[in-house]
Amino acid sequence: MGGLIFQLLLLAALSPISDAITELQILEIFYGKTEGNQWKNNTNWFDGEEYCDWHGVSCNSEGEVKKIVLSDNNMGGIFATEIYS
């Protein structure tokens, strides 16, 4: 249940609420705040690949993030409140 709530919060955060912050910026904040460098699998995150090719990130045909699934991935830290308003 906690995973579902997390996914819903993350999807809300990635919704097009403002042009002031991009999806890439949201993902950068998310990665940093959840200790992404300590994840079990952070394949392709910030290695020059498009973020739609990053481990756990799913995008639609327009290249917009629609889902992030990082189950059992040693995530820590806090949920970044600055990525939603």
Image (cartoon, helix red, strand yellow):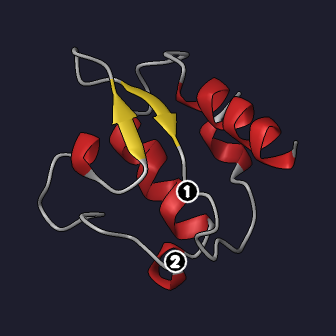
Where's residue 38, x and y in %? 52, 84
Q: Which picture quadrant has residue 77?
A: bottom right
Where's residue 17, x and y in %? 55, 16
Secondary element at tag 2: loop
Q: How many marks?
A: 2
Callout 1 crowding tier (Cα within 10 Å): few <14, some 14–19, many ≥20:
some
**Of pointers 1 and 2, the one earlier in the residue sequence:** 2
| Residue 70 tag number | 1
| Residue 39 tag number | 2
Q: Residue at x 24, y 64 (%)?
A: 44
- Residue 21 placement, left or right of 6: left
- Residue 80 placement, left or right of 17: right
Quadrant occupied by the C terminus: top right
Q: Residue at x 43, y 51 (%)?
A: 56
Q: Are marks 1 and 2 in contact (CB under 8 Å)?
A: yes
Query: The disc labelled 2 sits on which kind of residue?
Result: Trp
Quadrant occupied by the N terminus: top right
Query: The disc labelled 1 sits on which kind of residue?
Result: Leu
